[in-house]
Every structure is written in C-alpha cells, then in structure tokens.
Image (cartoon, rainbow, N blue to C red):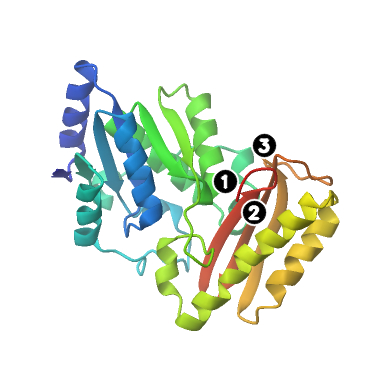
Amino acid sequence: MKIINSIVAMQALAIAPEREGRRIALVPTMGFLHEGHASLLRHGRSLGDVLVLSIFVNPIQFGQNEDLDRYPRDVERDCRIAEACGVDIVFMPTAAEVYPPGFQTGVSVRNLSLPLCGASRPGHFEGVATVVAKLFNIVRPDVALFGTKDYQQLAVIRRMTGDLNMPVEIIGMPIVREADGVAMSSRNAYLSPFERQSATCLMRALIHAREMFAAGERSVAILLNETRAVIEKEASAVIDYIEFREGSTLQELEVADDSTLLALAVKIGKTRLIDNTVLGEEL
C-alpha cells in the first residue's frame, strides 16, 4: 500500500493505470474511519483494479464555529483499516497542497445545496463540491463511492458529475449502523455515554415515521409532527431540521410516497448528527 501526499505524484500514479486500461475506484473520506467507510472500501475493491482512499479534512466545507480543529483524526488506525480492506493507494494531501496561495475557484450546485444541511451550513456544499471535483481531477477515478448517510451530499455530487460531464460513475452505499441503530459517524466519538444513548432517538423517529407510512399515512404534516414528537422526548436533543423531501430533487412535499426522503439533523449536546431514510426502501 502506497501513501501519497503530493498532488503531482498522485496524478502520475493515476495516469499509469488509466493508460493500461485498469479501472480506478476512489473512496473520498475525511479520515477517522469506521465500519461504514470500510464497507465502501470493500465494495470499491470489487469494482476497480486500483483502489484509492483519500483522507482529507476539507477546511472549506466547515463554517465558523464548526469543529474543523477538533475533528477526530487517527491516521495510523486509518491506514491499518485501509490495508485490511485492500487499498492500493492512500492519498493524504495537506490543506496547503489542495488550496495553494491565491486559490479562488469554487464549484456550486445551486438548488440542491440550499435546503436541509445547506440552510444551516451556508457554503458547506460548495466546499464539498469543490474538493470532490479536485479529487476527481487528481485521482481520475472511473468509479467513486459515497455513503447515503450524507444523502444531500451524494445528491450534490451526482448532480455536479452529470452537469459537468465528468466520466465518473457515482455509487451510493447503504448506511451502516451500530447494534442500537445509530448511524455510524466519525462525530459519534464526541458523544458522552449518556449522549450516545440519547442519539438513538434519531433511529426511533425514523422507524416511527416508517411505521406510520406503512400503515397508510401519507400526510407530510402529520408524519412531521409525529417524527418531531419522538425526538422532543429526549431532553438533550435539539432539532436542527426534520424534512420530508422528494428523493431526487429535494423539493418540498405535502404528500409522501415510496420515494420520499425523511432527513433529520439533530444536536445531541454539542454534537450535530444527521440520519435519513427513504420511506419505501428498506431501512
């Protein structure tokens, strides 16, 4: 397994397999890997001749007073997980390498970036789209894998890739959950034992909404109120948003159907967690 920090070196390595007709699979991450990331890497191993893991805590997708400086990092552990999953190249550039002095270009996916996390984190998805576009140009993947826990991020990346005619197949992978249903996230490390227990309210809310939908409820207003009630029972939970949206466009809805996305963002203590489900799909 090679560890590469230089963009020029990574581009040189990417061009060689491309010329030889070998497929490159990329899993972009911010590190502090967990089983959710590992599931992407294992599937990526089956899709490409060369598997690349990128680890980069992207400063331009963090807003003021967000957790850039304290975002969890453990490069040695990440590399052990990467090697166990069959990664060929770990690409770990510095922020100065990715954004040199004078950098001023961004990629904006306008409408998809506005609701949900975009409303509470202005500029976040421009930061995401910009760094992913740069990674695609550097690594030159044939296929890139992302988790559906970050549903809006995946939608933004798919739109960007299609709009800009990037020759990259985008694959969304299922959410990986802990035994109690909490979606795996690097930010779970911030939670105290009490907060970790409180975090199960997100999954309980998703299940309750899905049960109501399965029983025939289609009114978004009713589903929203019922979902909110579940979360508000947790004293340490503060709701950022609960939204029912059309699955591909993220447009608002009044009536739910099988393709409707239920997306949550909830603060447990100081830690902001997100989760989601598509009502007609398996949880």
Near mark 1 (Cα within 10 A), the count class, few <14, some 14-19 or many ≥20, is: many
Tell me if residue 163 comes above or below residue 283 in the rendering: above
Near mark 2 (Cα within 10 A), the count class, few <14, some 14-19 or many ≥20, is: many
Task: Name which of mark 1 and mark 3 comes first in the sequence.
Answer: 1
The amino acid sitting under disc 2 is Ala
Q: Contact (CB < 8 A) between labels 2 and 1?
A: yes
Quote the CA–CA distance across marks 1 and 3. Answer: 10 Å
On the image, the x and y values in percent for residue 38 come to 34, 50
Q: Using the rendered image of the protein, determine whether residue 69 is visible from the camera's viewpoint.
A: yes
Say which quadrant the N terminus sits in: top left
The amino acid sitting under disc 3 is Thr
Which is nearer the eye, 108 or 179?
A: 179
Residue 249: mark in rendering:
3
Disc 1 on helix, strand or loop? Answer: helix
Q: Which residue is mark 2?
A: 263
Number of numbered discs overlaid on the protein picture: 3
Q: Using the rendered image of the protein, determine whether residue 137 is visible from the camera's viewpoint.
A: no
Which is nearer the eye, 93 or 208?
A: 208
- Left/right placement of residue 153 relative to residue 54 reads right
Task: Name which of mark 2 and mark 1 comes first in the sequence.
Answer: 1
Q: Of tags 2 and 1, which is closer to the observer? A: 2
Name the residue rendered at 29%, 45% in the picture: 54
Residue 220: mark in rendering:
none
The amino acid sitting under disc 1 is Gln
Which is nearer the eye, 230 or 98?
A: 230
Near mark 3 (Cα within 10 A), the count class, few <14, some 14-19 or many ≥20, is: few
On the image, the x and y values in percent for residue 7 come to 21, 38
Quote the CA–CA distance across marks 2 and 3. Answer: 13 Å
